[in-house]
Amino acid sequence: MYYELMIRFLIGGTVIAGTTWIAEYFDPKLGGIIANIPSATILSLLIINSALGEKGAVLFAKGVVIGNIPWYGYIIAVILLTQRIGLVKSLAVGMLIWLLLVPLTWRIFKPV
């Protein structure tokens, strides 16, 4: 269990460091594109598959798709508000939108 968490931490840290480096020294948009590499999702799916089987992995993957709905609310707020109110405030508004959309999305897509 701790080994798996350490691997996730290392992969996540590597992706974050790499994408910020690319954004800083090459192109911020390219860094944003690369930030969406599904490395953490791949690792999570492999671990969930070993613990819960393919059915659990498929349910997890469906949760990732559903979880993107609140994330889009968050990132759209950041895109639209950053130049008006600044990055930190737009991140706060985006997180608030995300926090409001998560339970709503869960209710809509929760199995009966």
Image (cartoon, rainbow, N blue to C red):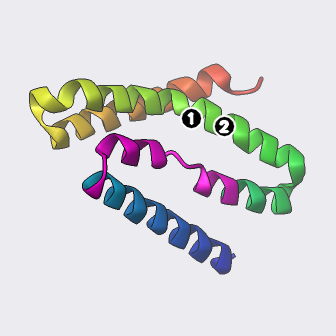
Question: Are discs 1 and 2 less than 8 Å apart at CB?
Answer: yes
Q: Residue farthest to the bottom? A: 3
* On-image quarter of the C terminus: top right
In the figure, 3 relative to 77: above or below?
A: below
In the figure, 97 relative to 108: above or below?
A: below
SS at badge 2: helix
Amino acid of disc 1: Gly
The residue carrying pointer 2 sits among few (fewer than 14), some (14 to 19) or many (20 or more) residues within 10 Å by Cα, namely some
In the figure, 51 relative to 73: above or below?
A: below
Q: Nearer the viewer, residue 39 or 1?
A: 39
Q: Nearer the viewer, residue 112 or 49?
A: 49
| Magenta stretch: dominant secondary structure | helix
Image point 54% across, 67% down: which residue?
11
Image point 50% across, 32% down: which residue?
102
In the figure, 28 relative to 97: above or below?
A: below
In which quadrant of the rendered view does residue 28 lie?
top left
Question: In screen coordinates, is 40 left or right of 71?
Answer: right
Amino acid of disc 2: Gly
Q: Which residues are magenta?
A: 25-43
Q: Write down the residue under mark 1.
A: 67
Magenta region includes residue 56: no
Q: Nearer the viewer, residue 101 or 72?
A: 72
Q: CA distance from mark 1 to mark 2?
A: 6 Å
The residue carrying pointer 1 sits among few (fewer than 14), some (14 to 19) or many (20 or more) residues within 10 Å by Cα, namely some
Q: Write down the residue under mark 2.
A: 63
